[in-house]
Image (cartoon, rainbow, N blue to C red):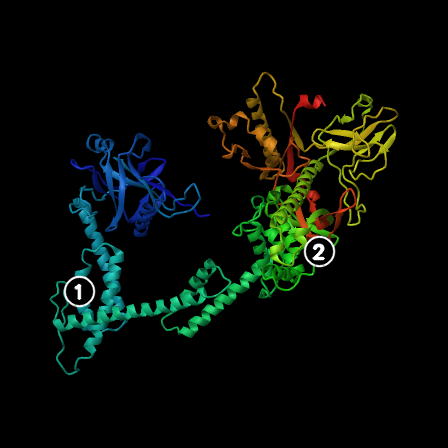
């Protein structure tokens, strides 16, 4: 990576490089004056080697000063000690004759330094390529300040004769040594470019008379010029003048007297020759102008042709025109320009098609094209949003058409559109145009409604920002979730390999884990208003909006709950320790239904199953409960279990179970025979007791919670070589953490902060996310830490409902509503080998747990 230097150009041994720009003086009457800060040239220093200050660098400093890229005023200080105060404020910069000039407004401190303390020299402080600390952008050469100094490094620079005039003219009074230096530079510049001019004229084999005349003029014109850019431009003009003059001489009679040509600077040229040269130069300028205008017209035609293309955004059109403009010349015909524009447009369309297909999960080969038969699907969604925006549910829905949907949501909707495009097109025509019929038969929920449920649910599912979202529409019973592994297992002897020996492989290994697709089903309630779809006026948009919002919220909460629970289960299963037959007899017979396990937190058990519900593989971290010498089952909440005693987990975080009957009502069994529980305890955690000790205030005590989070982060980075990038917790726990003393404004620490609403924004520079779904295992006791994009959420079939059926009341009579159920086939899992990328902090009250 290229490094850029920061120069402070005056002598300060062992630290920085500073360069004398000029001698300083201050005016007596007015507070402002022009000073010279530095000049272009090549300089050297035994500590830092050779460096250059070019005219382009000086011009860049002026541009950046005018643009205010530093974001503050620029000042002169004394001896490069800005902490002592400002000597003058820089009001304006200009480049004059290869020098950087500044109009400064002096302070009393600066006047005193120059007049009473002898600080007579100025040195500039600048960066070759300054980088701002807000956006990290590089801005090129930037002047950062200048200092009054008494120890210049580079000598023989012009002293500054300050003036209070508004112009930035170069000083007329020069130091004798400086004058000799400038004279030497001027002679060097003249000789260099005069030699180059004569060589160019000789190469063109021009007439000796024209060359001699132009040489005389060049010697007069180049005298005193030190600016190389100015000298180069002058020689180019003189070369063109010599060519024109030679052509004029060639037209003279061959047998006539040889003309005597003498060109001079002062305008005493022979009239004929001067007129010829002037005419030739004028014709050249006119031709160049016409050429430029013709070329510009061709380029304008190119831009207009590209801008007229449909389907491309303005940024793409601008990029296409700029990419092709370099091949346009004045000789290019209009037809060629139009053909070039069409080639650019076609290429852009092919790239856009490939990009869209890639975003939707496809990897096409060749040059793909997307052909849209009808845009009814897009218009149908716009129609829904437009009318739902007028409903009473508009405030709860995400209806802003300008808001870009997450890519994952776009993929799922694209698959739905592909599967049901004809039906969606028909629904749009029936709604918007009032034509044709919709084959509803009062038995089918409009697909447009289902599409809006998916769009609404996935557009506000914030937890998706923590996982990798995938689609697999192949229809198989299993899918694969990708992951990456850092593999250095084959590296031995600290990577030392001697001649002729095999070199081990190491690096990042890409792999896949196969997981089963699970069917997630959700029953929906549908009003008759939603189904009456033959004309738009019959729709009750308030009822429709409530249905969409309610169903989307339920779907969103179910997905969020599964994702959060899988994140916690995966974290707890890493390094889990089995506990066999923990005796709970002492806790029975006390009239309580609740059991507190000796070790906690408990790992949630898991059993992979296929689409038919059959077990796949062995269970992970199972829980077995033996009550009165009989192993009892877990309560499943279905209401279909036979009468008896069952168990359920109240809190995996606190290790509490409860005995209930088939209806879920607590029961307190007596203790007879064997009573034991086997389970797995999570060790990939650390615990923090909320109860203060030693008389410490609650606010100070909570600082320890922040330290716990920092300790787990350090463990992840130092022992597992994993950089966590998120925290997940409940809003209640988020609020508790913000009560820590260190979040008081006066005691905040870098890396931990709250947002403008007072909610926890980050701890140890880890952003904090909230669980926005009820009933998650995280509860109010868990802070989960980990890496994003490890858990995979794959959709194999988007959420679509089946045919509704009539609902009846308790009396058996219809109630004017129908119900249906929807299905989404998906897989939510963390590959086993990367479960170490998560860890947790358990936040609890020992007193509250003891009281259970």
Residue 276: percent from left, percent from top: 18, 73
The quadrant the C terminus occupies is top right
- Identify the residue at the far left of this view: 268
Camera sees residue 207: no
Choose top left, top right, bottom left or bottom right for residue 776: top right
Residue 536: percent from left, percent from top: 61, 56
Residue indicated by mark 1: 217
Residue indicated by mark 2: 444
Q: Secondary structure at mark 2?
A: loop
| C-alpha distance separating marks 2 and 1 | 94 Å
Q: Earlier in the sequence, mark 2 or mark 1?
A: 1
Q: Secondary structure at mark 1?
A: helix
- Identify the residue at the far bottom of this view: 255
Q: Residues within 10 Å of mark 2 (few under 14, many from 20)?
A: some
The one of 547 and 130 positioned closer to us in this rendering:
547
- Which residue sits at x=20%, y=59%? 222
């Amino acid at each position: 990576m290229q490094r850029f230097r920061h120069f402070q150009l005056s002598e300060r041994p062992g630290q920085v490089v500073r360069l004398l720009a000029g001698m300083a003086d201050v005016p007596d009457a007015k507070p402002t004056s022009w000073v010279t800060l530095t000049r272009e040239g090549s300089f050297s220093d035994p500590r830092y080697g050779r460096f250059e200050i070019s005219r382009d660098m000086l011009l860049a400093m002026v541009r950046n000063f005018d643009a205010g890229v530093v974001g503050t005023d620029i000042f002169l200080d004394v001896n490069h000690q800005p902490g002592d105060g400002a000597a003058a404020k820089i009001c304006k910069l200009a480049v004059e004759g290869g020098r950087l000039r500044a109009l400064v407004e002096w302070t009393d401190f600066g006047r005193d330094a120059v007049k009473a303390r002898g600080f007579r020299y100025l040195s500039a402080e600048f960066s070759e390529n300054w980088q701002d600390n807000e956006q990290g952008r590089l801005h090129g050469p930037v002047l950062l300040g200048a200092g009054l100094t008494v120890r210049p490094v580079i000598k023989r620079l012009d002293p500054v004769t300050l003036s209070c005039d508004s112009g930035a003219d170069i000083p007329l009074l020069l130091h004798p040594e400086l004058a000799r230096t400038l004279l030497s530079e001027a002679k060097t510049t003249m000789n260099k470019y005069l030699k180059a001019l004569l060589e160019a004229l000789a190469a063109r084999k021009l007439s000796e008379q024209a060359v001699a005349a132009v040489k005389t003029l060049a010697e007069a014109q180049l005298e005193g010029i030190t600016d190389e850019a100015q000298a180069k431009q002058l020689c180019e003009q003189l070369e063109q003048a010599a060519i024109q003059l030679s052509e004029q001489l060639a037209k003279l009679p061959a047998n006539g007297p040889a003309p005597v040509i003498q060109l001079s600077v002062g305008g005493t040229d022979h009239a004929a020759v001067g007129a010829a040269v002037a005419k030739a130069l004028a014709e050249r300028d006119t031709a160049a102008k016409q050429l430029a205008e013709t070329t510009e017209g061709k380029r304008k035609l190119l831009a207009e042709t590209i801008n007229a293309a449909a389907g491309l955004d303005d940024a793409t059109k601008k990029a296409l025109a700029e990419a092709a403009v370099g091949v346009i010349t004045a000789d290019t015909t209009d037809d060629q320009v139009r053909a070039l524009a069409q080639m650019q447009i076609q290429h852009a369309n092919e790239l856009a098609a490939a990009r869209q297909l890639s975003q939707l999960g496809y990897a096409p080969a060749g040059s793909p094209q997307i052909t849209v038969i009808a845009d009814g699907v897009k218009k149908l969604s716009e129609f829904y949003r437009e009318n739902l925006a007028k409903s009473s549910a508009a405030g709860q829905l995400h209806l802003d058409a300008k808001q870009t949907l997450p890519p994952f949501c776009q993929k799922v909707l694209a698959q739905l559109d592909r599967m049901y495009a004809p039906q969606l097109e028909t629904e749009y025509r029936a709604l918007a145009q009032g034509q044709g019929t919709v084959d509803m038969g009062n038995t089918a929920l409009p697909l447009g409604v289902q599409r809006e449920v998916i769009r609404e649910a996935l557009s506000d599912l914030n937890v998706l920002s923590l996982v990798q979202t995938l689609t697999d529409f192949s229809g198989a019973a299993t899918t694969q979730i990708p992951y990456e592994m850092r593999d250095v297992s084959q590296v031995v002897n600290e990577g030392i390999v001697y001649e002729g020996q095999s070199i081990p492989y190491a690096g990042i290994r890409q792999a896949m884990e196969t997981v089963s697709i699970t069917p997630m089903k959700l029953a929906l309630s549908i009003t008759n208003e939603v189904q009456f779809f033959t004309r738009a006026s019959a729709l009750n948009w308030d009822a429709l909006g409530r249905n969409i919002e309610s169903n989307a919220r339920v779907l969103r909460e179910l997905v969020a709950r599964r994702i959060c629970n899988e994140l916690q289960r995966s974290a707890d299963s890493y390094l889990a320790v089995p506990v066999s037959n923990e005796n709970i007899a002492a806790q029975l017979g006390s009239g309580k239904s609740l059991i507190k396990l000796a070790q906690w937190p408990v790992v949630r058990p898991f059993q992979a199953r296929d689409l038919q519900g059959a077990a796949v593989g062995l269970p992970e971290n199972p829980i077995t409960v033996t009550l009165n010498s009989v192993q009892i089952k877990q309560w499943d909440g279905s209401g279909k279990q036979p009468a008896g005693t069952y168990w359920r987990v109240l809190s995996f975080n606190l290790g509490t179970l409860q005995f209930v009957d088939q209806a879920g009502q607590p029961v307190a069994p007596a203790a007879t025979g064997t009573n034991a529980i086997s389970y797995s305890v999570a060790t990939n955690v650390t615990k923090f007791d909320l109860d203060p000790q030693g008389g410490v205030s609650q606010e100070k005590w909570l600082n320890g919670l922040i330290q716990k989070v920092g300790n787990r982060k350090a463990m992840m980075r130092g022992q597992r070589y994993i950089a966590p990038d998120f925290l997940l917790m409940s809003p209640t726990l988020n609020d508790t953490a913000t009560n820590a003393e260190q979040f008081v404004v006066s005691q905040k620490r870098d890396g931990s902060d709250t947002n403008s609403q007072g909610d926890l924004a980050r701890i140890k520079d880890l952003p904090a996310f909230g669980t926005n779904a009820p009933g998650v295992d995280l509860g109010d006791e868990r802070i989960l830490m980990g890496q994003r994009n490890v858990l995979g959420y794959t959709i194999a079939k988007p959420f679509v409902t089946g045919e509704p059926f009539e609902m009846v009341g308790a009396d058996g009579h219809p109630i004017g509503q129908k119900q249906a159920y929807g299905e989404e086939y998906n897989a939510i899992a963390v590959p086993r080998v990367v479960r170490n990328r998560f860890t947790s902090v358990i936040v609890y009250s020992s007193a509250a747990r003891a009281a259970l």
